Amino acid sequence: MKPVTIGILGLGTVGGGTATVLQRNAAEIARRAGRSIELVAASVRDINKKHSAELNKVKLTLDSNEIVDDPNIDIILELIGGTDLAKELVLRAIKNGKYIVTANKALIALHGNEIFEAAQRTGVTVAFEAAVAGGIPIIKAIREGLAGNQIEWLAGIINGTGNFILTEMRDKGRDFMDVLKEAQELGYAEADPTFDVEGIDAAHKLTILASIAFGVPLQFEKVYTEGISEITRADVEHAGELGYRIKHLGIARRVASGLEMRVHPTLIPHRRLIANVDGVMNAVLVHADAVGPTLYYGAGAGAEPAASAVVADLVDVVRALTTDPGNRVPHLAFQPDAIQNIEVLTMDQVETAFYLRMQVQDQAGVLADITRIFADQDISIEAIVQKEEKDEQDCVPLVILTHNVLESNMMVAIQKIESLVTVTGKIVRIRLETLG
Ligand code: HSE
């Protein structure tokens, strides 16, 4: 059979890794795809930059449009990142009848609904496994492997950079900025690393996971997002003493009143497998009605883990080239006309447990005042620990864990406790999930 021809848009970390894997594993990949795959062109930012030997026979260009418009190219690998140019190129390639593989989570989270509609109209496929959790085949697992289930919830460590930072801070007492710099040098971090640290990258990925898990449209704007930049070593230590680890989780949960989509630092019991996922590794825990819990673990960032997912998509797409467009695996797992809107809950409608830390005066009646406020808001306490070390105002840290509570009730309680004269400063609050 005639080889399939591909063009790569962008030879950065993922593009370079993909070219390497395609060449190194060419024979195995062809045995799986049923045809050989030929990388014929790639667009680059700097044509004079020295590229690796496997690109010797590849036509390099500064203009991605040349590749998108080339009638001799069957499949486009969009690996430039960003949303504006990437969207323009992908829509143009689809119009030209080309199949697409992309690692671009922002593109899919923000413009996926429009892109998939265009692809469906033209009868082509847009594959995006590498967009979520790097090398872990989580899209395929949920979309195909769990197709018989009703998914109840999923929770994931889906940003390698953030997990790397939290792990190094906890284990080695390293400084936040120092670890971030290393993540950038290793090619893990986004072009704008605040996307990693503030949870935007995780929110892009959660948008995609929620959509394929629950058959809802992609709705990035409805994901609640909170970053890790305010997590202190003190909270990491207190959490550890109480048997918890702090992880930056993306959580999507279907409850009777709607759908939760949220990214925030979360205390989880240290005995859970996912609590022990460290460094740049990612993991996604999926709870579904028939199978129960399943956990997917692997490298969430880096050149070759991402390339692994890109090439797997490429093999899928090559196999799909000769199939009936109406009978392919739907982009978002559910048939396009069966995608439904489920109300996305705002955070004040969400129920979670909480870790609270506050500075209080060490005197009679303080605890009684605090627990009365909790009781008034229907908040049940799971544990209270008062630390001995006094600060310059003679106050001691009080750490409280609560049972599940409606977030709106907790916010009222926090406000009331902060206004007590025996409590100084702001209360630190981190949500807690048992993931049971
Ligand atoms: N910046 C991302 C991360 C890369 O750290 O997980 C993979 O999407």
Image (cartoon, helix red, strand yellow):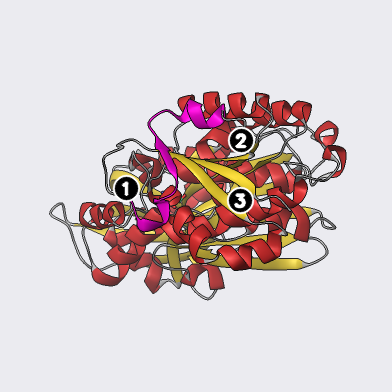
Residue type, mark 3 in image: Glu
Q: Tag on residue 230?
A: 1
User: Which structural element holds mark 3?
Assistant: helix
Q: Mark 3 Cα within 10 Å, few/some/many (few <14, many 20+)? A: many
Which of the two marks, 3 or 2, is nearer to us in this view? 2
The label shown at residue 72 is 2
Specify whether residue 212 is painted magenta.
Answer: no
**Which comes sooner in the sequence, label 2 or label 1?**
2
- Mark before the other along the chain sequence, 3 or 1: 3
In the image: residue 375, left or right of residue 355? right
| Residue 240: quarter of image | bottom left
- In the image, the segment drawn in magenta is 51-69
Residue 41 placed where, x, y %? 48, 41
Query: Is residue 52 on the magenta stretch?
Result: yes
Residue highlighted by disc 3: 129
- Queried on whether the Cβ of the residue with tag 1 lies below 8 angstroms from ligand 1, the answer reads no
Q: Residue at 60% of width from left, 45% of height from top?
A: 5
Which residue is pictured at 33% across the width and 43% down the height?
Answer: 193
Where residue 246 appears, x then y in whole percent?
42, 61
What residue is shown at x 49% (from left), y 27% (from top)? 66
Residue 48 x, y percent position in the rendering: 26, 40
Which disc, if any, is residue 421? Answer: none
Residue 157 screen position, x and y as percent? 50, 57
In the foreground, 343 or 318:
318
